[in-house]
Image (tube, coloured by chain):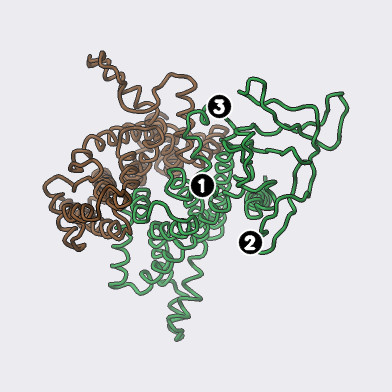
Amino acid sequence: MISKVALRVFHSLLLLLGVSVFAFALLSFAPGNFFDELKMNPQISPETVASLKVQYGLDQPLPVRYVRWAASVAHGEFGYSMSYRRPVASLLWWRARNTLLLATLAMLLAWTIALCWGVLQALHRGGWIDHSSRALTAVLLAMPELLIGLLLLLLAVRTGWFPTGGMTSINPMNTGFSTKLWDITIHLFLPVVALALGAIPVLVRHVRSAMIAVLESPFIEAARGHGIPRWRLIWRHALPAASNSLISLLGFSIGALGSLSLLTEIVLSWPGLGPLVLEGVLARDIHVVMATVMLSSLFLLVGNLFADLLLYWADPRIRAVGP
Amino acid sequence: MSNSRRTTLLISLLVALHLPVILAGFFAPYDYALQDRDLPFAPPSRLHFVDQTGAFHLRPFVYAWKQSPLGDAYEEDQTRMFNLRLFVTGAPYAAVGVWTSRLHLFGVEAPARVFVFGTDGFGRDEFSRALYGGRISLLAGFLGAAVALLAGGALGIVAGYYGKWLDTVVMRLVELFLALPWLYLLFAVRAVLPLRIKTTDAFLLFIGVVGLVGWARPARLVRGLVLSAKERNFVLAARAMGASELHILRWHVLPQTYRTILTMAALLVPQFILAEVTLSFLGLGVGEPIPSWGNLLTELQKYNVLVSYWWMYLPAVMLVVLFLAYYWASETLEERFATVSS
């Protein structure tokens, strides 16, 4: 077991290395760089630009730059942001924490709703609940995340119930723990709902089809024949049997949320990785973009690894064969 | 609803959504860049059948918008009626990109203008912009899906059919690309390109980017299909009869993948339309003055537009309807193939 996990982790690390080489090479082929804008400025001489390039090591060949960047990652700095003029790591952790907070809460909400909704749909298969739910999830599925974000923004502006961006109010008077917590909660509300709404339709459809497959199987029929109460039958017998495909989906949804949250964060101005990566792209701040790409890949790989372990724990058949 | 009725409905819905966009010049009453600085953010025109005196007209007509005395709203200038006409001559456009035409499906008598979706901040007709914008977005979706499916399909077939080290290499690459969150990858690749580039360049590069991002999933799917297809008895029989590898690949293995590729296409086209919309929305894709569905939505990031001008949401509604049609199509295809194969 331990060796298999170690193998998986090793495999993921290799993948991460591959991602970093690929992304770094790609970003380095850019025809422009951060200092190109400076060249336009008549106040700055070409020599200054050239010396700045030397200072930041942009004159070095690609492999050297990559090794330098990798060394910087090993030091925990993740390179140097040229527009912020400090190590990327100092920009990153705070924002990564915010993204993680947002994504985790959104995922919990989405899965809770999706499980209940999907099971309900499967139980009433073919009924009006099923049909209306399918129509509703189809509409949600067809709604681009940015439109969901914009509509929630409209709601916030129109009703005034929710703040429209940021993570905390600018109010030095509120220093108590409970007021702070409330402040963050109310700021979190819209981004979490937007993100969850984007994820729910896919999850609901999978839960529904997995549950229908299980509910039609003979052992559920038998359990029903034995007079096991309906509630217990659903949650204790049917759902664990349906969980197999859902666990893989869980791993995938963790990774996908990293991508989804990008847009939601930008539209609803949540101070996470999303706005940072957009700024980085616009300013051609390569190390910032690199760091966010790496972090989000890490997010995805950890999600998959987590799902595999969970599957291993949940399914005795896989345990017998090995992952 | 019977199955064939449903299919007919679906196909006519798809045609109804695509035709006006493909023939944007004909269906749009005005050019997408035509500005009217006196009519910024004018609401959609109202169609009337009954005039001031209460008389009924069979031919619908509109009133021109004029600023209210306070200048903060629009009201109808009811002194003069403008009839709505079909097949009018108007601004010239290149029909299907080849010959120049002046024929438009509908329009009103000059000097008034008819605004189906209202106007934007420059007084440009939002409906015309939505149709012209759809051309770019749809083309991006189709070409992107074509590139991704061709590249992914080819690599998947090669990996699945020839196997060995090629399979290993391709599948490792697939894992690598699937480990990259696609939106971040899209951003990263976009970061490679200069910020301000010509629209046509931006567009072509976008197709390349999307193909680069999107090939992995089709490749993995097609590889799985090919793997199972090449062990089928009819393939073994063909091989025993001395058919060449290329013949087997073309006539026995490839047809096994068509259904999946078609279903995949119905999923990928909206996904890549969405990619274009996302990039343009964030100002990284197609830029002004050329409209695309993405940069039409950019306007909504402005506070006053978001709150005050509901018609600026109409392009987004069009987008949602289109996506719904595509999801419906992919579901129908999936159902149909499932019943055929069982």
Chain B representation colour: green
Distance from label 2 to label 3 (Cα)? 37 Å
In the rendering, which numbered label is found on residue B288? 1
Tag 2 near tag 3, CB within 8 Å: no
**Disc 3 sits on a residue from what chain?**
B
Q: Position of residue B325 (x, y in %)?
A: 58, 47
Asked whether the residues under marks 2 and 3 belong to the same chain, the reply is yes
Closer to the camera in the image, A83 or A204: A83
Residue shown at the point (48%, 71%) measured from the top left:
B254
Crowding at label 3, few (<14), some or many (≥20) Cα neighbours within 10 Å? few
Of mark 1 and mark 2, the one earlier in the sequence is 2
In this view, the residue farthest toward the bottom is B242
Badge 3 amino acid: Ser
Of mark 2 and mark 3, the one earlier in the sequence is 2
Above/below status of B147 relative to A212:
below
Chain A representation colour: brown
**Would you name the residue on which mark 2 appears?**
B97
Distance from label 1 to label 2 (Cα)? 20 Å
Secondary structure under tag 2 reads loop
**Would you name the residue on which mark 3 appears?**
B308
Look at discs 1 and 2 and give the one toward the viewer: 1
Asked if residue B219 lies left or right of residue A129, the reply is left
